[in-house]
Image (cartoon, grey):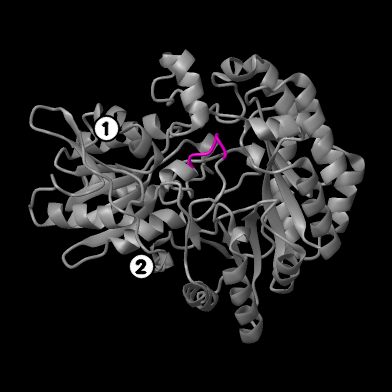
Amino acid sequence: MKAVFLKPPVDKAHKNVVRDFIYGCWCNGKRVGGMSLPPTNELLAATHARQPGLDVWFLDSQYEVQRYAELTANKFDGTLAVLVMSSTQSFRHDVGTLKEIKAVNPAVKTILYGSHPTFMPEYCLKEDVVDFIVTREAEETIRCLLEALLNGESADEIEGIGYRDESGKPVINPQRPFFNMNDLPIPNRSLLPEGVDYFNPVIRRVPFTTMFTSRGCPARCNYCTAPAFYGNKTRVRSADKILEELRIVRDLGYREVFYRDETFSAYKGRNMTVYESMLGEGMDFTWVANGRVDMIDREQMKMMKKTGCHLLKFGVETGSQEMLDNYKKGTTIEQAEETFRLAREIGIDTHAHIIFGGPGETIQTIDQTIDFVTHKLKATTATFGILTPYAGTEIFDMVEANHPDILDGSDSNMENLHTSGFFSESLCGIPGDVLSRKITEAYRRFYLRPGYLAERVLNLKTFDEFMIHSIAGMNVMQFAVSGRK
């Protein structure tokens, strides 16, 4: 019997849907430069699920179209279960995929895990094509559930799952305790589609891979699902475990690593040990990571640069201190300016994530933010998006209190995510169509500056960089001109 961890098919217009954050902050389209990422979190779950008598597959049907067609044509013969990582924005599409699978083989057990099953379990179980859900951290729960199904045993008492009882009533079992990050396996990258090179506009060398070295975030921003998903706790992998994985990906031929931790820079002591070992072993990687402007300093940044870091990504969010406070960000405008200045001095590129449309936002604060990112931060690159109320966040609860018609939030989808207003007017009073126009304006004002374009071209050093930036640049320019993903 086999268990298929499935990344569902999408239409040609959205072939680069990014599903690498298990808690659901996904994106797609030209706005993010046509980015795609290897789905490492799904690989972690698939790798951990391996057990005697079970053949574990990972199928990325965005790229393995023929393989998925053959599986469907064979009516999922010999398939015990299909597992899909689902967010609020993908939920309805994911349910449609499960309906197609159930239509050809009703005996296949279907399992959803990720953010939407965690925060909206009853909504998920209203769908009769969903047999089980897995909440919060999924790996061990999935392994136990598959073991029970494989052996024909009852799954009723398994922690961290939801199901329907004999009367059809949803049952949500108690949560499974979080486990030690060092107990997670190193993801089996041989499960990835053969011959597929995932594309990312921020990398310098190919092939590249992604890694996760921690879970959770020390911040408590009210728009983000990560704190609630991980129980408002942070857990980290040890330096030894990180180095073990780096040696494996080096031997597999990867040349660049994109650390996808929520806040990689927060764990300075551990990270400094990793940097020193990388230098001692002569590891030749270029790499990218996420940071917080209040959780990084000159000493760590210099070691980052020395070990190959060429880009740091920061959730700047806004150029207004009032808006930062409204988001419960816990940072200041001055910290952002200083951190971006320091990165320029040391020679590391910067990326600023920006959101419009939160509580208290005005046209004036939006214009202030565009000017701040463009002229004061002098970020190397930036992305601008409309705040989406994610299920599981304080922002979602604020909207739901006044607009219960938001239901489970799944009217927000990959078509409108971050580029169209979704209950935005209830948060800031600015209509969604106005916010959409400001997003397009922000891209034009940031990227269509002659001096900026000239600087980016002059800074290209290799043919890989030229090709990557050409593809990404065309995507972003098309969005800046048309406003369409």
341 and 467: which is toward the camera = 341
Distance from Cα at disc 2 to Cα at disc 1: 35 Å
Q: Residue at x 33, y 51 (%)?
A: 138
Residue placed farthest to the right in the image?
A: 451
Residue 461 - label: none
Q: Disc 2 designates what residue?
A: 183
- Secondary structure beneath dot 2 equals helix
Q: Residue at x 66, y 51 (%)?
A: 292
Q: What secondary structure is the magenta-colored segment mainly?
A: loop
**Residues drawn in magenta:** 221-225
Which kind of residue does numbered mark 1 sit on? Lys
Of the residues tagged 2 and 1, which is closer to the observer?
Answer: 2
Inspect this view and state whether residue 5 appears.
yes
- Secondary structure beneath dot 1 equals helix
Location of residue 290 in the rendering, given as x and y in whole percent from the top left corner: 63, 54
> Which picture quadrant has residue 447?
top right
Residue 99 - label: 1
403 and 305: which is toward the camera = 403
The count of marks equals 2
473 and 438: which is toward the camera = 438
Query: Crowding at label 1, few (<14), some or many (≥20) Cα neighbours within 10 Å?
Result: some
Location of residue 69 in the rendering, given as x and y in whole percent from the top left corner: 33, 45
Q: Is residue 51 above or below residue 62?
A: below
Q: Is residue 371 above or below residue 265?
A: above
Location of residue 331 in the rendering, given as x and y in whole percent from the top left corner: 69, 44
Q: Quadrant of the C terminus?
A: top right
Which kind of residue does numbered mark 2 sit on? Asp
> Which picture quadrant has residue 103?
top left
328 and 292: which is toward the camera = 328
